[in-house]
Image (tube, rainbow, N blue to C red):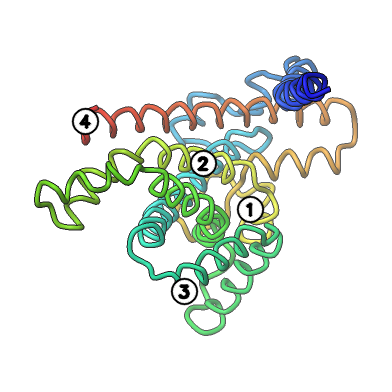
Amino acid sequence: MNRLILRILRIFLWFSAITVPVAVMVLVIFIVFKGLPAISLRLIFGDTNPLDALMLKQQVFEGIFPAMVGTFLVVILSVTWAIPLGILSGIYLAEFSGSHLKKFLDFSFDLLASVPSIVIGLFGLTVAIFLHKYLSRQIYPCLLISSISLAVLIVPYIVRTTQLSLDGVSYSTKLAGYSLGASKIQNLFRVVLPSAIHGILGGVILAVGRAAEDTAVIMLTGVVATAGIPGSVFEKFEALPFYIYYISSQYSDKSELLDGFGAAIILLIICGLLFCVAHLLKNVVVKKVYGF
Protein backbone atom coordinates (compact mmCIF):
# COMPACT_ATOMS: atom_id res chain seq x y z
CA MET A 1 0.00 0.00 0.00
CA ASN A 2 2.79 2.39 0.93
CA ARG A 3 4.64 1.53 -2.30
CA LEU A 4 1.51 2.24 -4.32
CA ILE A 5 1.04 5.62 -2.61
CA LEU A 6 4.72 6.45 -3.17
CA ARG A 7 4.46 5.51 -6.85
CA ILE A 8 1.33 7.64 -7.31
CA LEU A 9 3.04 10.53 -5.54
CA ARG A 10 6.08 10.24 -7.82
CA ILE A 11 3.88 10.21 -10.91
CA PHE A 12 2.00 13.26 -9.66
CA LEU A 13 5.24 15.12 -8.88
CA TRP A 14 6.68 14.23 -12.28
CA PHE A 15 3.52 15.39 -14.02
CA SER A 16 3.54 18.66 -12.04
CA ALA A 17 7.20 19.29 -12.84
CA ILE A 18 6.78 18.66 -16.57
CA THR A 19 3.55 20.64 -16.98
CA VAL A 20 5.09 24.12 -16.68
CA PRO A 21 7.94 23.73 -19.20
CA VAL A 22 5.62 21.96 -21.66
CA ALA A 23 3.04 24.77 -21.34
CA VAL A 24 5.76 27.38 -21.91
CA MET A 25 7.08 25.51 -24.95
CA VAL A 26 3.60 25.23 -26.44
CA LEU A 27 3.02 28.95 -25.90
CA VAL A 28 6.36 29.94 -27.44
CA ILE A 29 5.84 27.61 -30.43
CA PHE A 30 2.38 29.08 -31.00
CA ILE A 31 3.69 32.66 -30.86
CA VAL A 32 6.58 31.83 -33.21
CA PHE A 33 4.26 30.02 -35.62
CA LYS A 34 1.89 33.00 -35.73
CA GLY A 35 4.42 35.81 -35.64
CA LEU A 36 7.37 34.58 -37.68
CA PRO A 37 5.79 35.53 -41.04
CA ALA A 38 5.40 39.10 -39.78
CA ILE A 39 9.07 39.52 -38.82
CA SER A 40 10.61 41.92 -41.31
CA LEU A 41 12.39 45.25 -41.58
CA ARG A 42 8.99 46.81 -42.27
CA LEU A 43 7.72 45.68 -38.86
CA ILE A 44 10.73 47.17 -37.11
CA PHE A 45 11.45 50.30 -39.13
CA GLY A 46 8.28 50.87 -41.17
CA ASP A 47 9.00 53.02 -44.21
CA THR A 48 12.08 54.59 -42.60
CA ASN A 49 15.55 53.71 -43.83
CA PRO A 50 17.01 51.28 -41.23
CA LEU A 51 20.41 53.01 -41.22
CA ASP A 52 18.82 56.43 -40.69
CA ALA A 53 16.72 55.00 -37.85
CA LEU A 54 19.70 53.36 -36.16
CA MET A 55 21.72 56.57 -36.44
CA LEU A 56 18.71 58.51 -35.03
CA LYS A 57 18.64 60.72 -38.10
CA GLN A 58 14.99 60.00 -38.87
CA GLN A 59 12.10 59.11 -36.57
CA VAL A 60 10.27 55.81 -37.07
CA PHE A 61 6.48 56.22 -37.11
CA GLU A 62 5.12 52.91 -38.40
CA GLY A 63 7.61 50.44 -36.93
CA ILE A 64 8.39 49.09 -33.49
CA PHE A 65 12.00 50.30 -33.33
CA PRO A 66 11.14 53.12 -30.85
CA ALA A 67 9.26 50.58 -28.72
CA MET A 68 12.32 48.30 -28.68
CA VAL A 69 14.56 51.16 -27.58
CA GLY A 70 12.02 52.30 -24.99
CA THR A 71 11.80 48.79 -23.56
CA PHE A 72 15.57 48.63 -23.12
CA LEU A 73 15.68 52.07 -21.51
CA VAL A 74 12.87 51.52 -19.02
CA VAL A 75 14.22 48.11 -17.96
CA ILE A 76 17.78 49.37 -17.50
CA LEU A 77 16.62 52.40 -15.52
CA SER A 78 14.26 50.40 -13.32
CA VAL A 79 16.85 47.79 -12.34
CA THR A 80 19.36 50.60 -11.76
CA TRP A 81 17.07 52.00 -9.06
CA ALA A 82 15.92 48.62 -7.72
CA ILE A 83 19.18 46.66 -7.44
CA PRO A 84 20.97 48.78 -4.79
CA LEU A 85 17.81 49.27 -2.72
CA GLY A 86 16.75 45.63 -2.98
CA ILE A 87 20.14 44.08 -2.24
CA LEU A 88 20.91 46.44 0.67
CA SER A 89 17.44 45.85 2.16
CA GLY A 90 17.88 42.09 1.85
CA ILE A 91 21.29 42.28 3.55
CA TYR A 92 19.81 44.32 6.40
CA LEU A 93 16.94 41.88 6.89
CA ALA A 94 19.23 38.84 6.89
CA GLU A 95 22.16 40.15 8.92
CA PHE A 96 21.29 43.22 10.99
CA SER A 97 17.58 43.59 11.79
CA GLY A 98 16.12 42.61 15.14
CA SER A 99 13.41 39.98 15.40
CA HIS A 100 10.47 42.38 15.83
CA LEU A 101 11.61 44.80 13.13
CA LYS A 102 12.38 41.87 10.83
CA LYS A 103 8.84 40.54 11.17
CA PHE A 104 7.42 43.95 10.36
CA LEU A 105 9.69 44.44 7.34
CA ASP A 106 9.06 40.89 6.11
CA PHE A 107 5.33 41.56 6.23
CA SER A 108 5.80 44.93 4.50
CA PHE A 109 7.79 43.50 1.59
CA ASP A 110 5.42 40.55 1.24
CA LEU A 111 2.54 43.02 1.13
CA LEU A 112 4.33 45.12 -1.48
CA ALA A 113 4.99 42.03 -3.59
CA SER A 114 1.27 41.18 -3.51
CA VAL A 115 0.13 44.63 -4.67
CA PRO A 116 -1.29 44.43 -8.24
CA SER A 117 0.83 46.18 -10.83
CA ILE A 118 -2.09 48.42 -11.83
CA VAL A 119 -2.13 49.83 -8.28
CA ILE A 120 1.59 50.60 -8.51
CA GLY A 121 0.84 52.27 -11.83
CA LEU A 122 -1.75 54.44 -10.10
CA PHE A 123 0.84 55.26 -7.45
CA GLY A 124 3.27 56.39 -10.16
CA LEU A 125 0.56 58.48 -11.81
CA THR A 126 -0.25 60.10 -8.46
CA VAL A 127 3.44 60.91 -7.94
CA ALA A 128 3.58 62.51 -11.39
CA ILE A 129 0.48 64.61 -10.65
CA PHE A 130 1.88 65.68 -7.27
CA LEU A 131 5.24 66.69 -8.79
CA HIS A 132 3.48 68.50 -11.62
CA LYS A 133 1.35 70.49 -9.17
CA TYR A 134 3.86 71.29 -6.45
CA LEU A 135 7.33 71.03 -8.00
CA SER A 136 7.28 71.88 -11.71
CA ARG A 137 4.63 72.33 -14.36
CA GLN A 138 7.03 70.67 -16.81
CA ILE A 139 6.79 67.27 -15.06
CA TYR A 140 4.35 64.79 -16.60
CA PRO A 141 4.16 60.99 -16.72
CA CYS A 142 7.45 60.09 -18.37
CA LEU A 143 10.24 57.54 -18.68
CA LEU A 144 11.67 58.47 -15.26
CA ILE A 145 8.33 58.01 -13.45
CA SER A 146 7.76 54.69 -15.23
CA SER A 147 11.20 53.38 -14.28
CA ILE A 148 10.75 54.37 -10.63
CA SER A 149 7.31 52.72 -10.56
CA LEU A 150 8.73 49.53 -12.09
CA ALA A 151 11.53 49.64 -9.51
CA VAL A 152 8.88 49.65 -6.76
CA LEU A 153 7.29 46.64 -8.47
CA ILE A 154 10.48 44.52 -8.63
CA VAL A 155 12.22 45.56 -5.40
CA PRO A 156 10.40 42.93 -3.26
CA TYR A 157 11.68 40.13 -5.52
CA ILE A 158 15.29 41.30 -5.15
CA VAL A 159 14.87 41.78 -1.41
CA ARG A 160 13.46 38.29 -0.93
CA THR A 161 16.03 36.49 -3.07
CA THR A 162 18.85 38.37 -1.37
CA GLN A 163 17.51 37.59 2.10
CA LEU A 164 16.88 33.92 1.34
CA SER A 165 20.30 33.53 -0.29
CA LEU A 166 22.02 34.99 2.77
CA ASP A 167 19.89 32.93 5.15
CA GLY A 168 20.84 29.84 3.14
CA VAL A 169 24.55 30.28 3.88
CA SER A 170 25.56 27.66 6.42
CA TYR A 171 26.26 28.68 10.00
CA SER A 172 29.79 27.25 9.85
CA THR A 173 30.56 29.39 6.79
CA LYS A 174 29.31 32.50 8.56
CA LEU A 175 31.65 31.74 11.48
CA ALA A 176 34.70 31.28 9.24
CA GLY A 177 35.55 34.98 9.08
CA TYR A 178 35.05 35.52 12.79
CA SER A 179 37.43 32.68 13.57
CA LEU A 180 40.14 34.55 11.65
CA GLY A 181 39.48 37.81 13.48
CA ALA A 182 37.34 39.53 10.84
CA SER A 183 34.80 42.15 11.85
CA LYS A 184 31.10 41.75 11.05
CA ILE A 185 31.39 43.96 7.94
CA GLN A 186 34.54 42.18 6.73
CA ASN A 187 32.93 38.79 7.28
CA LEU A 188 29.82 39.92 5.41
CA PHE A 189 31.63 41.16 2.30
CA ARG A 190 34.45 38.61 2.17
CA VAL A 191 32.69 35.43 3.28
CA VAL A 192 28.89 35.60 3.43
CA LEU A 193 28.14 37.60 0.26
CA PRO A 194 30.48 35.55 -1.97
CA SER A 195 28.73 32.39 -0.78
CA ALA A 196 25.30 33.84 -1.64
CA ILE A 197 26.19 35.75 -4.82
CA HIS A 198 24.67 33.16 -7.18
CA GLY A 199 21.25 33.38 -5.55
CA ILE A 200 21.35 37.18 -5.29
CA LEU A 201 22.18 37.66 -8.97
CA GLY A 202 19.59 35.04 -9.87
CA GLY A 203 16.99 37.25 -8.22
CA VAL A 204 18.24 40.23 -10.22
CA ILE A 205 17.81 38.24 -13.44
CA LEU A 206 14.22 37.40 -12.49
CA ALA A 207 13.58 41.07 -11.71
CA VAL A 208 14.82 42.03 -15.19
CA GLY A 209 12.24 39.75 -16.78
CA ARG A 210 9.48 41.09 -14.53
CA ALA A 211 10.32 44.67 -15.49
CA ALA A 212 10.47 43.89 -19.21
CA GLU A 213 7.01 42.34 -19.45
CA ASP A 214 4.82 44.61 -17.34
CA THR A 215 2.22 46.72 -19.12
CA ALA A 216 -0.10 48.11 -16.45
CA VAL A 217 2.58 50.18 -14.68
CA ILE A 218 4.02 51.87 -17.74
CA MET A 219 0.59 52.36 -19.32
CA LEU A 220 -0.31 54.81 -16.53
CA THR A 221 3.09 56.44 -16.05
CA GLY A 222 4.42 57.54 -19.41
CA VAL A 223 4.13 55.09 -22.30
CA VAL A 224 2.19 56.14 -25.40
CA ALA A 225 1.70 54.68 -28.87
CA THR A 226 3.67 57.14 -31.04
CA ALA A 227 6.15 58.95 -28.79
CA GLY A 228 9.27 57.98 -30.70
CA ILE A 229 12.66 57.59 -29.02
CA PRO A 230 12.78 59.79 -25.88
CA GLY A 231 15.39 62.52 -25.81
CA SER A 232 15.51 62.55 -22.00
CA VAL A 233 14.08 60.71 -19.01
CA PHE A 234 11.40 63.39 -18.68
CA GLU A 235 9.77 62.54 -22.01
CA LYS A 236 7.14 59.96 -22.91
CA PHE A 237 8.26 56.76 -24.59
CA GLU A 238 7.11 53.62 -26.37
CA ALA A 239 7.45 50.03 -25.15
CA LEU A 240 6.82 46.63 -26.68
CA PRO A 241 4.44 45.31 -23.99
CA PHE A 242 2.16 48.30 -24.51
CA TYR A 243 2.43 48.00 -28.30
CA ILE A 244 1.39 44.33 -28.13
CA TYR A 245 -1.54 45.22 -25.86
CA TYR A 246 -2.56 48.15 -28.05
CA ILE A 247 -2.36 46.32 -31.40
CA SER A 248 -4.04 43.15 -30.14
CA SER A 249 -6.97 45.03 -28.59
CA GLN A 250 -7.59 47.46 -31.45
CA TYR A 251 -6.45 45.67 -34.61
CA SER A 252 -8.51 46.32 -37.76
CA ASP A 253 -7.33 43.39 -39.89
CA LYS A 254 -5.39 40.15 -39.69
CA SER A 255 -2.08 41.73 -40.71
CA GLU A 256 -2.11 44.05 -37.68
CA LEU A 257 -2.78 41.11 -35.38
CA LEU A 258 0.13 39.24 -36.94
CA ASP A 259 2.29 42.32 -36.28
CA GLY A 260 1.36 41.92 -32.62
CA PHE A 261 2.61 38.32 -32.66
CA GLY A 262 5.77 39.47 -34.42
CA ALA A 263 6.32 42.10 -31.73
CA ALA A 264 5.82 39.39 -29.09
CA ILE A 265 8.64 37.36 -30.67
CA ILE A 266 10.92 40.40 -30.61
CA LEU A 267 10.00 41.04 -26.96
CA LEU A 268 10.97 37.45 -26.15
CA ILE A 269 14.26 37.95 -27.97
CA ILE A 270 14.94 41.17 -26.05
CA CYS A 271 14.17 39.42 -22.75
CA GLY A 272 16.51 36.60 -23.78
CA LEU A 273 19.26 39.11 -24.57
CA LEU A 274 18.76 40.83 -21.23
CA PHE A 275 18.95 37.46 -19.46
CA CYS A 276 22.17 36.62 -21.34
CA VAL A 277 23.72 39.96 -20.41
CA ALA A 278 22.69 39.45 -16.78
CA HIS A 279 24.24 35.95 -16.78
CA LEU A 280 27.46 37.31 -18.28
CA LEU A 281 27.60 40.04 -15.65
CA LYS A 282 26.92 37.40 -13.01
CA ASN A 283 29.88 35.35 -14.21
CA VAL A 284 32.10 38.44 -14.33
CA VAL A 285 31.16 39.39 -10.77
CA VAL A 286 31.76 35.88 -9.49
CA LYS A 287 35.11 35.41 -11.24
CA LYS A 288 36.61 38.88 -11.12
CA VAL A 289 35.39 40.27 -7.81
CA TYR A 290 35.26 37.14 -5.67
CA GLY A 291 37.73 34.93 -7.55
CA PHE A 292 35.59 31.82 -8.05
Q: Choose between 274 and 229: the one closer to the eye.
A: 274
Q: Is mark 3 on a helix, strand or loop?
A: helix
Q: Is residue 182 left or right of residue 107?
A: left
Mark closer to the chain start, 3 or 4: 3
Q: How far apart are the two marked residues, 3 and 1, measured between alpha carbons?
A: 41 Å
Residue shown at the point (50%, 40%) measured from the top left: 72
- Can residue 49 be seen at all in this image of the molecule? yes
Return the x and y of residue 152 as percentages of the image width and height. 54, 60
The residue pinned by badge 1 equals: 223
**Residue at the farthest right position:** 253
The residue pinned by badge 4 equals: 288
Work out whether 23 lies above or below 108: above
Q: Residue 208 carries which label?
A: 2
**Residue at the farthest bottom position:** 134
Mark closer to the chain start, 3 or 1: 3
- Can residue 31 be seen at all in this image of the molecule? no
Q: Is mark 4 on a helix, strand or loop?
A: helix
Q: Choose between 149 and 166: the one closer to the eye.
A: 166
The residue pinned by badge 3 equals: 100
Residue 142 location, quadrant: bottom right
Mark closer to the chain start, 2 or 1: 2
